[in-house]
Amino acid sequence: MAACPPFSSKVNASHNPSLVTSGNAHSNEKFLYTKLKTDYPIVCICHSYDSLVAGSDEGRVLLWTGPLTDTKSPPQHFQLDMQDSVNVICPRSSDTWLVGCGKHLLQVQLNSASLALLWSVECGDEINSVDINDKQTYCAVADDTGSVSLIDLKSGKMHKKLSGHDNICQCVKFRPKSPWCLLSGGLDCMLFLWDFKKGQALASVNMADELRKGEVESEKSSYVVNPPLIHSLCITADGLIAAVGLENGKIMLFTIGGKGLKLASCFDAHSQGVSSLGLTNDLTLVSAGNDTRIVVWALSTARAPGKTLVWATELHSITHAEKPSGIQILNESKRIIVADETETVKIYDYS
């Protein structure tokens, strides 16, 4: 297997801090905490403010409130006035949520008794990812046109569009502690760092170009068969490190500077695409792959002359029954909520 810059995970990590080290794989029964059963396939999930909100097909939204231990209590079920799948849920407050349904972004007031529409805006195509900035003044929306739309949360009006991707924009995240910066990743293999106040890209990285560095000639053709499309993205709470999940099963870790992105490490995380990523405040990274595995990693950093070293250590590997479509990490309890487009939401405990 060819090395991926700086190195691949097949070497003893103690000799280079840019490597991933491995833990032990376990069946899901070791980690399974509880199951929440529904009557509908769950496409996406989001837990915040002691509520779990899930999106399903045909405009359905489901709500669980309180502790996620009462498996006998069914969720509240609400129906939007549209038939597209609810692909994205994003919290704004305890009773206000953003819902991506088809190409429409909705802000709804949601509680156990009712769902009320506050505003709706139409984006260019099907919505794949939504994020809210630290000040809760704007949300960023990634869609199938390749654009990132900035929506004014107070008015629900389109503020600005960022155009840089040549293919579907799959994921978008605001950079914490940097009020005008966000990152976007797409199926064009491109990662962009944007200044959305100026409406311009500060930096861009082509994943295929990064992976080709150090590859032997005989293996360069693998990028035609299995290109490093970007499926998932997350950023540490200090805004200094971004993790990027790729179609080829690798995770790339970048350090983020004022106007640039620098590859810190890259490792083989899954045998198929990395569909979801999540980070906790203590630098625990959770990845979910189309190989049905959910992996818990510990990220570590160290300073070196002129750069920051970042590496990952595998702590746990959980074998899930299906391909996860979304994950949510509960920081304090060290639990992972998993949706997989079946009628059952599973919660794992990795403490």
Image: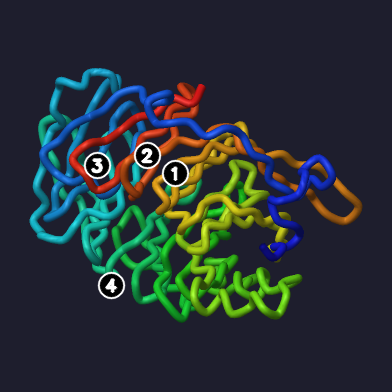
Q: How many marks?
A: 4
> What's the mark number on residue 293?
1
> What's the mark number on residue 125?
4
Q: Quadrant of residue 92?
A: top left
Q: Nearer the viewer, mark 4 or mark 1?
A: 1
Q: Please indicate, yes or no, whether residue 232 appears anywhere in the rendered image.
A: no
Q: Closer to the N terminus: mark 4 or mark 3? A: 3
Q: Secondary structure at mark 2?
A: loop
Q: Are marks 2 and 1 in contact (CB under 8 Å)?
A: yes
From the top left corner, tell me how far across and down residue 270 is, in percent. Answer: 52, 51
Q: Residue at x 15, y 35 (%)?
A: 38
Label 4 – label 3 distance at C-alpha: 21 Å
From the top left corner, tell me how far across and down residue 194 is, in percent. Answer: 57, 67
Q: Closer to the N terminus: mark 2 or mark 1? A: 1
Label 2 – label 3 distance at C-alpha: 19 Å
Q: Amino acid at mark 4?
A: Asp
Towards the viewer: 218 or 263: 218
- Give the residue number, with chain letter if any, for mark 2: 320
As displayed, is residue 175 above or below residue 194?
Answer: above
Q: Closer to the N terminus: mark 2 or mark 3? A: 3
Towards the viewer: 327 or 54: 327
Q: Quadrant of residue 138?
A: bottom left
Mark 4, other Cα within 10 Å: few <14 / some 14–19 / many ≥20: some
From the top left corner, tell me how far across and down residue 162 is, in percent. Answer: 47, 73
Mark 2, other Cα within 10 Å: few <14 / some 14–19 / many ≥20: many
Q: Residue at x 58, y 34 (%)?
A: 281
Q: Closer to the N terminus: mark 2 or mark 4? A: 4
Quarter that holds the N terminus? bottom right
- Give the residue number, with chain letter if any, for mark 3: 54
Kindly give the residue lying farthest to the right in the view shown: 305
